[in-house]
Amino acid sequence: MAFSLSFLKIKSVPILFWSAKKTQSLRPPLVSLVFLVLGLTIFGLGEALLITAAVGVSPWTVFAQGLANVTGIDIGLSTFILSISVLLCWIPLRQRPGIGTLANAVIIALVLGFALPYLPHFDHLALQLLQSILGVIITGFGGGIYLIANLGPGPRDGLMTGLQRVTGRPMALVRTSLEVMVIAIGWSLGGTVGIGTLFFALGIGPSVAASLFGLQKLCTSRKAEPI
């Protein structure tokens, strides 16, 4: 119970042994790069599970659908415009990109392309819902690993960490509020919302926070053990 209550209060990304000292470094430590790739790979696998669960797209895809519906552009261009818009929101938040920002797009796309053909596609609703929940948990776990690498977040994760720093609110609350707002806008514009969309919106913030909290506790406890 203590863990379940404590992780919701985490307000920053911890600095652990694989954290790079400088986010904008062009020659980061090898361990930081390894954990960046590992985290993004796990993140991409979680997103692939969400897609194959087929019970609702992510909140930002709902937003992209709505924007495409209103403007008449295709969803690919709509998604690109939203990504650029999110990056522009970084400016007043003083959020800076790093090589992890670019790696976010490249590695996750590669993982999705590789993993999607091999993941199961269930017809039973209960299994689809379970797969969707598992996808949210795995996505959050991967997000925690790559954020701790401190080499630059992806556009949406950067918006989360930037807003958290400005507001001082817990990470889980900031991310959940952001995702719910995105769903509301996307749905009002004509995007399609499913149960998996709600799982993601309500679960990704706590999942990322739990990952950050758990990894910090694990590494701190090991460091404190006598040799």
Image (spheres, helix red, strand yellow):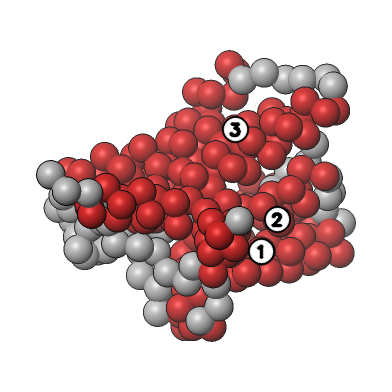
Residue 130 rendering spot, x and y as whole percentages: 73, 32
Task: Give the residue number, with chain letter if any, for mark 1.
Answer: 176
Task: Give the residue number, with chain letter if any, for mark 2.
Answer: 201
The quadrant of the rendering that contains the N terminus is bottom right
Q: Nearer the viewer, mark 3 or mark 2?
A: 2
The quadrant of the rendering that contains the C terminus is top left
Local SS, label 3: helix
Residue shown at the point (55%, 43%) measured from the top left: 139
Local SS, label 1: helix
Residue shown at the point (29%, 55%) measured from the top left: 220
Task: Give the residue number, with chain letter if any, for mark 3.
Answer: 48
Residue 146 rendering spot, x and y as whole percentages: 38, 49
Mark 3 or mark 1, which is nearer the start of the sequence?
A: 3
Question: In the image, what residue type sits under mark 1?
Answer: Thr
The residue nearer to you, when weighing 208 against 40, is: 208
Would you say 176 lies left or right of 28 here? Answer: right
Looking at the image, residue 206 lies above or below residue 10: above
Would you say 134 lies left or right of 127 here? Answer: left
Question: In the image, what residue type sits under mark 2?
Answer: Ala
Mark 2 or mark 1, which is nearer the start of the sequence?
A: 1
Mark 2 or mark 3, which is nearer the start of the sequence?
A: 3
Q: CA distance from mark 1 to mark 2?
A: 6 Å
